[in-house]
Amino acid sequence: MKFFTCIFLLSLVLCVTSDNWAQRAGKFMKDAYGATTVSITVIICLVYGDFPFVKESPFISSSRFHLVDGTVRKRGAKDMARAYTDMREANWKHSDKYFHARGNRDAAQRGPGGAWAAKVISDARGFYKHMRGRDEADRRADQEANRWGRGGGDPNRYRPKNLPEKY
């Protein structure tokens, strides 16, 4: 984990002078480790607050990573994971927006920690899609569904016809 953290910080330092430094840093890490490994590791670090370099660095304050109860964040992350698992299990055409909204709503209902976890996971997923060159319009529609769900909106707004009642 420390090695990954060092690579991440190095990629930020090397790419910070460019206009799109976040994109270049992500590409640097993707080339070094592979996109799936990087995205999963970053999401786990952000959601669970496992930042080993925070304790070691005099420049970074760990207080901003402990604004909410870790238990609530973990439950919110589990809500998001459950929605993702259900989406994969359902394997239903045009259902992704529904599951995005449902996962965000369920996580946000747990309070500020759950909403924070939902936002972090949704933003990381959106960034990952952007890095992979996915359709920008689809990514924006996903983010709109995420915001709708986090705002307490009914996810059935995005529910496709004939999706089994189980979901």
Image: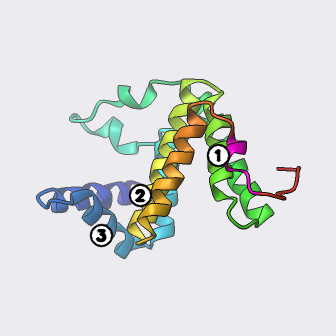
The answer, for residue 24, to whether it is visible in the render is yes
The answer to whether 53 appears left or right of 146 in the picture is left
- Could you say whether the residue bearing mark 2 is in a helix, strand or loop? helix
The residue lying furthest to the right in this view is 165
Check if residue 89 falls in the magenta segment. no
| Separation of residues labelled 3 and 1 (CA atoms) | 28 Å
Check if residue 159 falls in the magenta segment. yes
- Amino acid under label 3? Phe
Coordinates of residue 141 in the picture (x, y in percent): 51, 54
The answer, for residue 38, to whether it is visible in the render is no
The label shown at residue 28 is 3
- Amino acid under label 2? Phe
Q: Main secondary structure of the magenta part?
A: helix
The answer to whether 102 appears left or right of 139 in the picture is right
Q: How many marks?
A: 3
The one of 130 and 82 positioned closer to us in this rendering: 130
The answer to whether 25 appears left or right of 134 in the picture is left
Give the quadrant of residue 109. Answer: top right
Which residue lies at the image location 60% right of the left edge and 24% below the top edge? 111
- Amino acid under label 1? Met
Quadrant where the N terminus lies? Answer: bottom left
- For the residues bearing labels 2 and 3, Cβ distance under 8 angstroms: no
The label shown at residue 80 is 1
Which residue lies at the image location 45% right of the left edge and 62% below the top edge? 137
Q: Which residue is mark 2?
A: 127
Which residue lies at the image location 64% right of the left edge and 46% below the top edge? 80
User: Which residues lie in the magenta part?
Assistant: 155-160
Which residue lies at the image location 41% right of the left edge and 57% below the top edge? 127
Query: Which of disc 2 and disc 1 is earlier in sequence?
Result: 1
The answer to whether 96 appears left or right of 47 in the picture is right
Coordinates of residue 154 in the picture (x, y in percent): 68, 36
Answer above or below: position of 123 versus 36: above
